[in-house]
Image: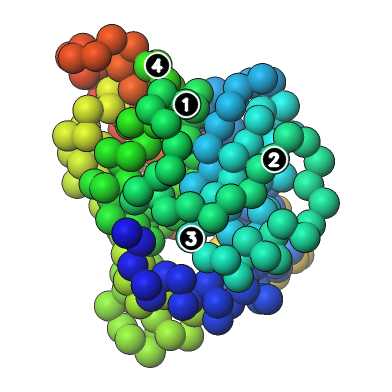
Amino acid sequence: MVRPGEIEHGQVIADKAESVWNWASPAGRQRAARRGELIIKAAGLKPGMRILEIGCGTGLFTRAFAATGCHVDAIDVSPDLLAHTASKEIPGDVLFRLDDAEALSYEDDTFDAVVGSSILHHLDVNKSLSEMFRVLKPGGQIAFAEPNMMNPQIVMQRKIPFLRRLAGESPEEIAFVRWSLMKQITNSRFESVSIVPFDFLHPFTPKLLIGLVKVFGATAEHLPFMREIAGSLIISASKPVHAGQAAAVTSYESITCE
């Protein structure tokens, strides 16, 4: 089961979640738009696919996923967040549902893709990966964007309690080092695993400087060592088409963050 602290956190932030998560500022909105595009690309979303969005939160990314023409089952463990989200008008075929990513209520082989933004770091990763593998159809894809533990700000937020509270983080959330996360995903029987650092645009970037920071970030994302401290990771992997099939070669660089 998802940890109780996450449900309590959702109750506390429900009416201000996008501000707490830094999506509400001008730079934050641009970060969210790009993040949604990268998840869609990594998951290979196409019209007619049935997809599961884990941790739909405020529905910000649900809107982007539904715009692809996919049938979206959008779940969250927080009834308070879902109450706010379900009241919004999101065009497309979307079903909002209270569900637990660590013990999904769906049948095996249900979805073409499982996606989410900033959700895996709230979960027991191994349990949630096992459930995603189960509900994916053979050949199905997962795609997520998650915080990068190599980023200096994220390290400080996770290690210093005052900064953690100031950032509005839940008590249990973590961040990922991509090499160790790669092992977890591979050990969960996924193949073609790709984890790529991206995002140097800070949500508090002044509006007048956003363009300049984006140019810097586009360069930094392609520089060895420098890219390792980017703020986020774009993660993708697929379920083998045939049960028992050997995992394909994994890669840290498969996705181009354009």
Q: What residue type is labelled 1?
A: Thr
Figure check: 174 above or below 230: below
Q: Which is more foreground, mark 2 or mark 4? A: 2
Sooner in the amino-acid sequence: mark 1 or mark 4: 1
Residue 77's label in the rendered image is 3
Q: Earlier in the sequence, mark 1 or mark 2?
A: 2
Residue mark closest to the camera, 1 vs 4 = 1
Sequence-wise first label, 3 or 1: 3
Few, some or many residues within 10 Å of mark 1 (<14, 14–19, 20+): some
**Residue at mark 3 to residue at mark 4: CA–CA distance:** 27 Å
Q: Residue at x 24, y 14 (%)?
A: 243
Q: Residue 126 at what x, y percent from top left?
A: 24, 46
Q: What residue type is labelled 2?
A: Val
In front of the other: 60 or 35: 60
Q: Mark 4 points at which residue?
A: 139
Q: Which residue is drawn at 49% across and 47% down?
A: 54
Front: mark 3 or 4: 3
The image's mark for residue 94 is 2
Residue 222 in percent (x, y) is at 43, 38
* Residue 110 tag number: 1
- Determine whether 72 is above or below 69 in the image: below
Discs 3, 1 touching: Cβ within 8 Å: no
Residue 220 makes an appearance in the image: no
- The residue closer to the viewer here, 206 or 129, is 129
Residue drawn at x 73%, y 34% is 93
Please report contact status of discs 3 and 4: CB closer than 8 Å, yes or no.
no
